[in-house]
Amino acid sequence: MFSDLRQAGRYLGQTMRLMVGMPDYDAYVTHMQTTHPDQPMMTYAEFFRERQEARYGSGAGKCC
């Protein structure tokens, strides 16, 4: 029962972070370790900055 509640809490937390645009660094780390172990991994600050740029853009070439 507690493991089900814990998993539900994780899903809820991940959903809430995605809803407000907060990237999931833990999911990124897991993905990189399992899928791309030979590639360098971004730090949290680099990851956050990259996700912000992907979401909002750098502003270059935009009128507003």
Image: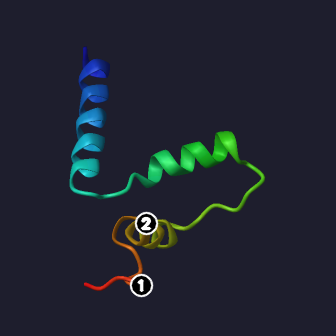
The quarter of the displayed image where residue 35 is located: top right
Label placed on residue 61: 1
Please tell me which residue lies in front, 43 or 64: 64
Say above or below: 61 vs 34. below
Residue drawn at (34%, 71%) of the image: 56
Residue 38, percent across and down? 78, 53
* Other-residue count near label 2 (Cα within 10 Å), few / some / many at <14 / 14–19 / ≥20: few
Question: Which residue does the numbered mark 2 point to in the structure image?
Answer: 54
Residue drawn at (51%, 50%) of the image: 28
Q: Earlier in the sequence, mark 2 or mark 1?
A: 2
Residue 29, percent across and down? 55, 50
Please tell me which residue lies in front, 25 or 2: 25
Q: Are marks 2 and 1 in contact (CB under 8 Å)?
A: no
The amino acid type of the residue labelled 2 equals Ala
Say above or below: 64 vs 26. below
Q: Residue furthest right?
A: 38
Q: Give the quarter of the figure containing the N terminus.
A: top left
Residue 53, percent across and down? 42, 72
Residue 55, percent across and down? 36, 65
Label placed on residue 17: none
Residue drawn at (28%, 28%) of the image: 6
The amino acid type of the residue labelled 1 equals Gly
Q: Give the quarter of the figure containing the C terminus.
A: bottom left
Query: In the figure, is residue 31 to the left or right of 18?
Result: right
Asked which secondary structure carries label 2, the reply is helix
Please tell me which residue lies in front, 30 or 23: 23
Query: In the figure, is residue 52 to the left or right of 11?
Result: right
